[in-house]
C-alpha cells in the first residue's frame, strides 16, 4: 500500500512541504486547509499605544521611563520624533542618542511589560490577560514587578491571580490555570511560547506579546552554543494574537513597533540552521544508510544546513576521536 504522510500545523509553510513531497508524477502534495473559528482580534503595536499607556500612568510612567533598560528598548523600537515627544510629554530627561544594538542583545524591560498589563486591566472590566515572554528570567521579573512595585493596582488582592507557564513549573501548579477561577477574579498568565500552540487557556481576551523567544544558536567558528533571545516569525505573531480570539473578540498588544513586526521573517529560523550539528551527524552515522554519506543525507533535508556547518560538525567529532 502507498505510504501516506500527514503533517499538521497552524504555522506551517505549505508550499515548502508540497514541493518536498511530490507524487510519482512530480505533482506537489495536496493540502487541506481547515478554516479557523476564532473571533476578530484588534492588533496594536508599541508605537501605536505606548503614548496612551504613558499618558494615563502619571508618576508611575515617569519612574518607568527613567529606567535605562526602558530607554534602550524604546530607543530601538520608536522613531526619534515619537521618542522625543513621549519623553517631553512625560517630563522625563530624554535618551541622549538612538541606541543601536543587535536584536539578541536587547533586554525585555520588565516594568514596561508590567505597565502595559496594568493599562489593559484598567481599561477593561473582565477577561484574562496572556503575556508572552522569552524565558523564566523575564517571567519571574515581570511577576516580581507586578507584585512588589507600585503599578497602581494591588495585584496581591483576591481580584487578581498571577500564574506562570514554563516547563520548569510543576504540572499540578500549571493545571490550576485550566480550572474556573473564583467569581470576579481576573488572571494574568505569564508564559513562554508553550501557550502559543500547545495549550489553550479559557477566557483569554487580551494578549501582551514581547515578540521574542529563547533560541539555541551555535557559532561554528568559536565552537560555542548559546541560548539567545531572538525575534519570532510573523506566523508566530499571528498565532499568539489568535489566542485572544478563541471565545470572543480580543485585543493584542505587541511590544515591538509595527515597522519591526512587518520586517520579521515569515517563519522562525529552522533549528537545523542554527544549532551544533554534531549530535545530528552522530545519529545519521548510527542509522548507517548503505552507500550514502552524512553530507548527502543532510543535503537532502527539506531545509538543508550550510555545507560549512556540516563540515565543522564532522571536524569537531574527528578531533575528539
Image (cartoon, rainbow, N blue to C red):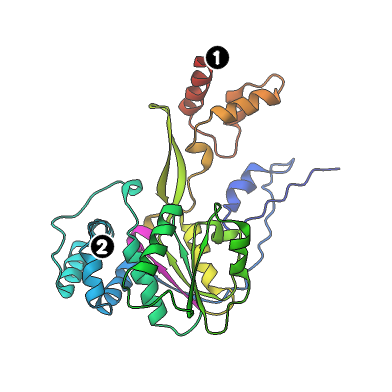
Label 2: which residue?
78
Magenta span includes 270: no
Magenta-tinted stretch: 250-261
Residue 4 visible in the shown view = yes
Horizontal side, residue 285 vs residue 207: left or right: right
Horizontal side, residue 266 vs residue 154: left or right: right
Horizontal side, residue 199 vs residue 266: left or right: right
Looking at the rendered image, the quarter that the N terminus falls into is: top right
Magenta span includes 257: yes
Horizontal side, residue 49 vs residue 266: left or right: left
**Residue 4 at x, y = what percent?**
77, 47
Q: Tell me the SS state at disc 2.
A: loop
**Residue 127 at x, y = what percent?**
51, 79
Residue 211 visible in the shown view = no
Q: How many marks?
A: 2
Q: Splitting the image into 4 quarters, where does residue 113 fall?
A: bottom left
The residue drawn where x is 13% and y is 65% is 93
Looking at the rendered image, the quarter that the C terminus falls into is: top right
Residue 42 vertical position relative to residue 169 in the rendered view, above or below: below
Q: Nearer the viewer, residue 72 or 270?
A: 72
Label 1: which residue?
321
Mark nearest the camera among 2 and 1 is 1
The residue drawn where x is 43% and y is 58% is 140
Amino acid at each position: 500500500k502507498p505510504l501516506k504522510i500527514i503533517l499538521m500545523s497552524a504555522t506551517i509553510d505549505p508550499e515548502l512541504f508540497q514541493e518536498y513531497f511530490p507524487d510519482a508524477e512530480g505533482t506537489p502534495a495536496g493540502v487541506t486547509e481547515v478554516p479557523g473559528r476564532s473571533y476578530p482580534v484588534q492588533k496594536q503595536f508599541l508605537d501605536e499605544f505606548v503614548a496612551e499607556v504613558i499618558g494615563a500612568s502619571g508618576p508611575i510612567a515617569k519612574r518607568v521611563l527613567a529606567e535605562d533598560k526602558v530607554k534602550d528598548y524604546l530607543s530601538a523600537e520608536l522613531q526619534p520624533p515619537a521618542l522625543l515627544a513621549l519623553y517631553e510629554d512625560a517630563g522625563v530627561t530624554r535618551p541622549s542618542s538612538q541606541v543601536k544594538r543587535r536584536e539578541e542583545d536587547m533586554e525585555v524591560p520588565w516594568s514596561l511589560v508590567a505597565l502595559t498589563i496594568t493599562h489593559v486591566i484598567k481599561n477593561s472590566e473582565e477577561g484574562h490577560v496572556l503575556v508572552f515572554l522569552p524565558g523564566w528570567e523575564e517571567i519571574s521579573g515581570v511577576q516580581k514587578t507586578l507584585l512588589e512595585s507600585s503599578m497602581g493596582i494591588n495585584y496581591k488582592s483576591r481580584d487578581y491571580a498571577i500564574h506562570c507557564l514554563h516547563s520548569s513549573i510543576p504540572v499540578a501548579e500549571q493545571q490550576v490555570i485550566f480550572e474556573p477561577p473564583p467569581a470576579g477574579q481576573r488572571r494574568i498568565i505569564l508564559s513562554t511560547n508553550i501557550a502559543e500552540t500547545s495549550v489553550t487557556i479559557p477566557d483569554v481576551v487580551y494578549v501582551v506579546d514581547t515578540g521574542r523567544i529563547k533560541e539555541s544558536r551555535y557559532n561554528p567558528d568559536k565552537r560555542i552554543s548559546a541560548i539567545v533571545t531572538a525575534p519570532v516569525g510573523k506566523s508566530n505573531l499571528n498565532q499568539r494574537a489568535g489566542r485572544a480570539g478563541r471565545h470572543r473578540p480580543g485585543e493584542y498588544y505587541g511590544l515591538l513597533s509595527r515597522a519591526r513586526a512587518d520586517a520579521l521573517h515569515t517563519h522562525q529560523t529552522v533549528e537545523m540552521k542554527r544549532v551544533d550539528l554534531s549530535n545530528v551527524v552522530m545519529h545519521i552515522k548510527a542509522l548507517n544508510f548503505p552507500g550514502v554519506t552524512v553530507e548527502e543525507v543532510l543535503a537532502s533535508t527539506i531545509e538543508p544546513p550550510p555545507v560549512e556547518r556540516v563540515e565543522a560538525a564532522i571536524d569537531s567529532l574527528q578531533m575528539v576521536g
